[in-house]
Amino acid sequence: MVWSLVAVAFWVMLPAYVPNNFAVLAGGGQPIDGGRMMGDSRLLGDGKTWRGTAIGTLAGFLLAMGLNAVNAPASAALGAQLPDFPLLVAVGLAFGAMLGDIGASFIKRRSGRQRGAAFPGLDQLDFVIGALLLAFLVDPTWFIETFTIGVIAVVLVMTPILHVTTNVIAYGLGLKNEPW
Ligand code: CTP
Ligand code: K
Ligand code: MG
């Protein structure tokens, strides 16, 4: 029971987990805010780029399509009925994750935090909020069937743990400037 909740939660969030990691790998180029300021701070900052956002979204979408292709054997192997990703949901989860991260940068700049500064709590869950919100907006029926209270509870506990772990690894490998 708990195992199948964990399996479903991890599976369903994978297309929202990978965009940020791919954005880190792909980042660079034109910032989304084009250098614009709001008051004394940048609107978003140099850490949110068009390229990172586009490649991150594409990676999450393609991963969802890949997961759909292996759903049956994976469900059998894990002993859980894993969800399929409708096209719009796949886009919603991936792009929503990027939007959540961008929204967090907006909030960080308004609260005087420079690019790269940590905002514990927000850093770990911004992309989850964005992904869930956009998935709900594009397909409420799928969302309500898939994101039961149990799945959401597991996602909220599991995500910060995974996020901290992957970022520490990315920092250790020299891919990221800060371990958060
Ligand atoms: N990145 C990107 N585009 C995005 C998100 C991330 O290009 N939409 C890249 C940037 O190179 C960024 C790196 O991934 O510096 C790390 O992402 P993140 O930690 O989210 O950004 P920060 O640089 O920490 O900036 P912020 O303080 O605004 O979160
Ligand atoms: K971030
Ligand atoms: Mg950061």
Image: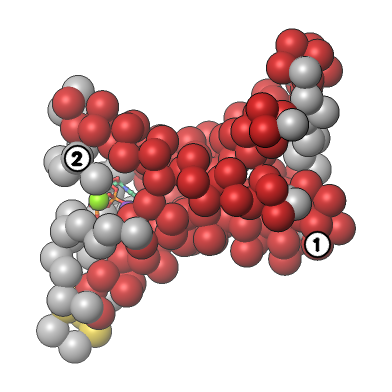
Q: Amino acid at mark 2?
A: Pro
Q: Position of residue 34 (x, y in %)?
A: 28, 67
Which quarter of the figure is the C terminus placed in?
top left
Residue under label 2, please give it: 179
Residue located 48% across and 36% down the image: 18
Residue located 40% across and 45% down the image: 160
Residue located 80% across and 35% down the image: 84
Which quarter of the figure is the N terminus placed in?
top right
Q: Nearer the viewer, residue 119 or 94?
A: 119
Whether residue 5 is visible here, answered yes or no, is yes
Relative vertical location of residue 80 with respect to residue 36 in this rendering, above or below: above
Whether residue 62 is visible here, answered yes or no, is no
Q: Nearer the viewer, residue 26 or 119?
A: 119
Q: Position of residue 162 (x, y in %)?
A: 41, 36
Q: Amino acid at mark 1?
A: Pro
The image's mark for residue 140 is 1
